[in-house]
Every structure is written in structure tokens, then in C-alpha cells.
Image (cartoon, coloured by chain):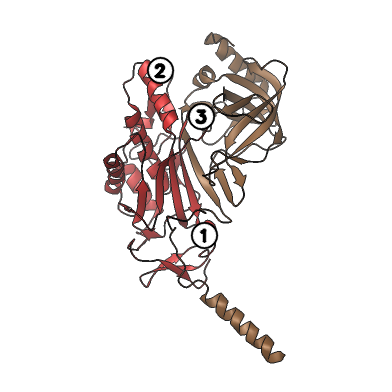
Amino acid sequence: MRGIGRPLRLRRLHLHRWVWQPVTYSGGSSLLQPADVDAAVMDWNNAQGRVPLTAQVGAPNDLQISDKPLNQQYIYGLTTVFGMTCNSICLNKIATCNGVSLGCANSSAIYYVTLNLDTNEITNLANGLSSAGFSTSSSELALISLRHELGHALSLGHPLSTTRTCSATQSIVMGNSGSINSVCGVTVPNTSCDGAVLNNVYSSSPGYCDPSTSATCSGSCS
Amino acid sequence: MKIRIIGALCIGVLINVTSGYGQALRKDPVSRDPCPGGTGVGILDGISPDSLEQLVRLSDLIVAGTVAKVLPSTLINPNNPSLPETTSLISVNEVVWGTLPYGTNTIAISELGGRVGPCGLVIADDPLVESGEEYIFFLVAEKRRPNTSGSPLYSTFGAGGGKAKITDRKIQFLPGASKGLHRHDNTATDAFIATVKATAILLQKKP
């Protein structure tokens, strides 16, 4: 596969990063079984160890997965990162969990992420592919999309379009033959690229914060 | 009086020092306000044509236009305060391919992003258009939802590739566009429009 072994040029997502782990997730998609969502999460957990994702029903809620119409044709997913600027109570205060400092909850720290899938557009895309002779179900496309968006939720941006980096967060492109592919056909996160870049973004794991423990903020920092 | 002032100052300092203690760092799932005073950064994912030919093939209308007015942002769903969209009016300078609806020289385009109340959304690598900017727009008709703009409503094609900015009479695709589209960056606008027209003819695309 082209790109493996080349310098990693995936871009970070606007310098936002988690300051605690594990990151809890909840929700799902009407196109996916709950087990599919858990499997997609496990694909990322297997590819990287810095920021593990864990299912959580109830508080706290770091990552919310849901179906939402995005009102744009040919747009099937949106990951939105809310930084600590959206949590004015804790902004620029020292984050603490179980007595251990997690670092500064500044504007670079992720507060909350939403992951939206547009099931209508995913289904339209699957139908279009089917009529073009490509056998891809809406569930398969939803799963590829979910894996892709989870990469954004961990803070990975799209690779530069001018490179041929093989990554699960590479934009899905439409070829002139009518086929839909991610670059190099990578639809599942891999250790060598996605994992390596996350290890680069997070030089060490963020501080551990048990989801059942109430994390707090105090003092001031920047 | 002096003692009262000193006392009030001490209480103020005490409140300031202790105000952070006991505050929740993580988001409460029942919180209905995901972004008090803040703006989310979104990464949009959609079909990204890997060539100009593909982009032309899939567009309903291609125009060169100037952003005449950016309308106030609205919510796609009133129950979803963190998902705003913004409609802008485009004055069409030239129809590159396709047909404008009869009797108008202005169209509306809808883009994800904007701000409604306390919630803002900025799409990374695909910012909202601004008044006075010029673009080549590759558009798809939006017929599935209410249109209150007063002009025919379109959206730009896919993620990133559906609008090419014109700066100093040269073309610049947005960072999120594919390598095949970025190949046309810095092409003179007139030459690029000629290429688009030739591509449409080659594809035997009918308006």
C-alpha cells in the first residue's frame, strides 16, 4: 500500500486534545447494531493505546454518537469538537480527577464531542453504488463512516489531500469509475499510520480518570 | 466604612478562589446547553470528487458569482442548538454550465456552520462564504426542504470541493478538496472556466 512508511502528515484537529482518558461514548445509529458501534470503537482501541474509548451509559458523556440530518447532499458525517471554551466554569482551570492533576482545561482541551451520521445520505450513497454495480450496503457504509468519524473524535484531522497517506481518516473520494474508496482502500484504523499519528499527537496518555469519579477544576492556568 | 470595603474585597477574593472547586469538568449528559459561550469546530465528511471531470459530472449548476449577502444563521432542527446552517445570496456573474431558474440572477446557497444564540459552529477547512468574495460554485439543487430565502436554493457539492475561490483572477480550491482539484489552483479564472465548459461538452452533459 502506498504511503505506509512515508513521513506521517496527518493533521491534528485544531490543536484540541483530550486531557483525560478513557473517553466515554454513548449512542449509535439506526443503520448499525450496538455491537457494530462497539466493534468500530475496538478497532480504534486496537490501533492505539493512548486514548482508549469505553462505553458508558449515563454520566459522564464525552462522545455522543447519533443520527442527524445535515441538510447537505453528498454529506454523510460531521464530527464537532467542543473545547473547554464551551465549559466556561472550568475554562483555564486545573483539571483534577481523584486528587490527581490532569493538566490545564484551556482552550486546547476537548470538553465534549458530537458525532453525527446522516443516514439518508449514507443510504442514498449505498443505493447509488448499488445501481452502479458496486455491492455496498448502507450498514457497511455507515460503519466505514463511523470509524472515520471516530478518528476525528480522537483529534485526527484529514490527511493533506496532496499526500497519499493511508489512513482511516483519509477523505472518502469518488473515482471516475463511479467507485467510492478511501485512499489506499484503508477503511479500518491501522497501528502503523493512525495509531502512530495518535501516539505522536499524545506523547503520553492523558491522565486516567475513572468515569465513575467526578472530575473537577480549580485554581487557574493557561 | 473602611472595614466594610475590606470585608467585601476579602469575600470577593474568597469567592474567586473557591469558585472552581466542585465544578464538573466533564459534560453532564442531561445538560441541554452544549456550548455556553463557545464555538464547536466541525469536520465535515462527504463525497470528495477526485477530479474536475467528476465534479462537473455531478453538479446541477456551475456559476461564477459574488457573495451579495450572508443571511442570519438558522438551526437545522430547533431541538439541536449546536447545528446551525447559514444561507447566503449569490449574485451570478456568469453561468458556466447549466441553466438558472427563469427570471433571476441571484441564487441562494446553504452551508453548515454559523452562530445561533450561544452556539457557534465553524467547519474546519470549509469556512462560510463572506460578502464580496468571488467563487466558482459547483452546485446541487436543494429541493427537499423549505426555502425562505426568496431565491432558488442550492448547496455546494460535497465536502470542500464545491467552491473554488477567485483571488486576483486566479482559482484556489479549499484545503479539503482532493489532489485532482488542487491541480487547478492558480489557474487564471478565464482559463479555468474554459476548461470546465470543455469538460462539460466532453461529458455531453445537457443542461
Kindly state the secondary structure of the residue where label 3 is placed. loop
Residue A87, disc: 1
In which quarter of the view is residue B102 placed? Answer: top right
Nearer the observer, disc 1 or disc 3?
1
* A185 sits to left or right of B104: left
Q: Circle 2 marks a residue in which chain?
A: A
In the image, the chain rendered in red is A
Q: Residues within 10 Å of mark 1 (few under 14, many from 20)?
A: many
**Disc nearer the start of the sequence (2/1):** 1
Disc 2 and disc 3: Cα gap in Å?
A: 17 Å
Q: Circle 3 marks a residue in which chain?
A: B
x and y, in percent, of residue B36 in the image: 56, 56
Q: Which residue appears at 31% of the width and 45% of the height?
A: A41
Q: Circle 1 marks a residue in which chain?
A: A
* B51 sits to left or right of B118: left
Q: Which residue appears at 53% of the width and 56% of the height?
A: A86
Q: Is residue B203 above or below residue B110?
A: above
Kindly state the secondary structure of the residue where label 2 is placed. loop
- Identified by mark 1, the residue type is Asn
- Identified by mark 3, the residue type is Gly
In which quarter of the view is residue B145 placed? Answer: top right
Residue A177, disc: 2
Nearer the observer, disc 2 or disc 3?
3
- Identified by mark 2, the residue type is Ser
Q: Is residue A137 above or below residue A77?
A: above
Q: Are marks 1 and 3 in contact (CB under 8 Å)?
A: no
Q: Residues within 10 Å of mark 2 (few under 14, many from 20)?
A: few
In the image, the chain rendered in brown is B
Instruction: Work out whether residue A8 can be spotted.
Output: no
x and y, in percent, of residue B152 in the image: 65, 24
Residue occupied by mark 3:
B158
x and y, in percent, of residue B24 in the image: 45, 65
